[in-house]
Every structure is written in C-alpha cells, then in structure tokens.
Amino acid sequence: MMRRWVETRKRAGPELELIRLREVRDEDTRLSLQQLASLFNHATRTNPPDDSPGPVEMQRLFAKLPR
C-alpha cells in the first residue's frame, strides 16, 4: 500500500506542483490581506500580546506539559 502511494505521488507530484504555482501566481494578495485583516484585528483585540519576552513565555508553556 505504501509503495503504491509513493508511486502515485511520484507521478502526480509534478502536476500538483504546477497547480500550486498557478494558484500562487493567480492569487490576489491585496484582496487576501483585506479579507484576513478583520480576523487578525479580532484576534489581537480578544487576545492581546502580553509584555513578557518570548523565551520566558515559551518556558512557562513548557512547564505546563506533562513530563
């Protein structure tokens, strides 16, 4: 089953890459940013960044992980 998947991916890979490149090229970046702006603004309003430095925050989160 795995071998079949790998072979299928090998054959489809170049075509999938062409599709990805075409989608990237055709994307309207300005429109995408306008559409995402309200989501970004909402996220920063409802969960504002705190004043702690990044590494300190990371260590705080790591401390919560089970050992």
Image (spheres, rainbow, N blue to C red):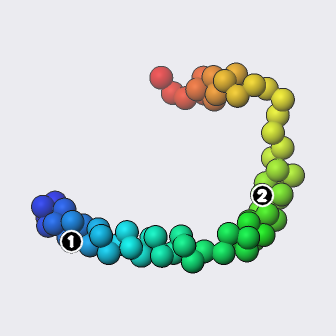
Asked if residue 57 can be seen in this view, the reply is: no
- Residue placed at 46% from the left, 70% from the top? 21
Q: What element carries label 1?
A: helix
Residue 59 appears left or right of 44: left
Kind of residue indicated by mark 1:
Arg
- Which part of the image, by quadrant, shows the N terminus? bottom left
Residue occupied by mark 1: 11
Frontmost of labels 1 and 2 is 1
Numbered disc 2: secondary structure: helix
- Which kind of residue does numbered mark 2 sit on? Phe
Expressed as whole percent of the image width and height from the top left, the position of residue 66 reads 51, 27
Which tag, 1 or 2, sits closer to the chain's start? 1
Q: Who's the residue at 16% across and 66% down the image?
A: 7
Q: In this view, does 55 lie above or below 23?
A: above
Q: Is residue 36 left or right of residue 48?
A: left
**Disc 2 designates what residue?**
40
Left or right: 30 as drawn, with respect to 4: right
Name the one closer to the observer, 6 or 48: 6
Residue closer to the observer: 59 or 25: 25
The answer to whether any part of residue 40 appears in the image is: yes
Q: Residue at horizontal 79%, vertical 63%? A: 37
Residue 56 on image: x %, y %: 70, 22
Residue 38, horizontal then vertical, whole percent: 81, 65
